[in-house]
Image (cartoon, helix red, strand yellow):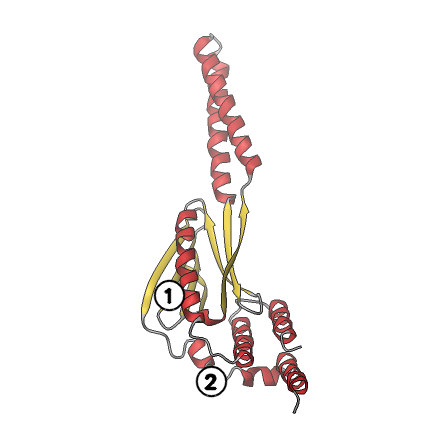
Amino acid sequence: MSLDNTATMSAEYFHKIATDETTEHISLGEDFAVLAGAEEPEKITERFEYRNRLRGRRAELILYEEGYMRVREWQGKKRVRDYLLSLRFMGAETTVTRKLPMRVLQVAAGFAGVGALSSLIAWLSPWDGFFVPSAVAGFVGAVLSALLFVYLASERTIFSTASGGAAALTLRGTADSFKRCRAMIPLIQDAIEEAQAKNIQNRSDYLRQEMREHYRLREFGVIDHDVCSVATRKILSEFG
């Protein structure tokens, strides 16, 4: 059988896996039980935690020597996410997006200026009955605007799957956790590279297993159906 025919048959096989729900569940295969948490990895190498106190959010990341990461997230006291991620199928490159509401910061500076000017006028003039409340209002406005800036400011660092490009891990840094999140990134990248070094050499088998990982992540609500479909098409395109 020619190499072209083999590639065509492989592409058809993977397309069937991607579109047939019955085949899809069967294709999860031998390592799905481990990835789903039936056999938890045990050797913890790093454990991180970061918080967004204003929004009541907390996240915990646990790295395992076996090449996995446990991701847990809370909203208040409720755990909203808990899944195991195989680092073998992750890319070490990151995508970073920042949200800094500078207009809110400018408003805070404006309020602070009004407060300072009103305080000065109240001290120098006999009309303190008007300017003292104005100064207080200015400083209160400045404080509230600064808190709003802290609440809205964010930095997201996204790790995606190696071939499918599906965003499977997002670090949501905020004003009280920017440094903590940034400190985690090189350690996570090192863990990904170490896990990738243990990958099987057969490219077709690797892609098949990464496709399984996308299905599993979809089952756990980490990625949605559309993201899974796009990732599947990207993988299929590598078969020609």
Residue at point 55% right, 36% down? 104
The answer for how far apart the CA atoms under marks 2 and 1 are is: 22 Å
Tell me the kind of residue under disc 1.
Leu
Q: Is residue 86 visible?
A: no
Residue at point 43% right, 66% down? 193
| Residue 49 in picture, x, y percent from top left | 37, 56
- The residue under label 2 is 30
Question: Within the image, what quadrant is residue 36 found in?
Answer: bottom left
Furthest residue in direction top, as rendered? 126
Compared to 143, does 156 lie above or below? below
Residue at point 44% right, 76% down? 35
| Residue 207 in picture, x, y percent from top left | 55, 77
Tell me the kind of residue under disc 2.
Glu
Compared to 43, does 12 lie above or below? below
| Residue 216 in picture, x, y percent from top left | 52, 75
* Foreground pick, 74 / 18: 18
- The residue under label 1 is 63
Quick one: label 2 or label 1, which is nearer the N terminus? 2
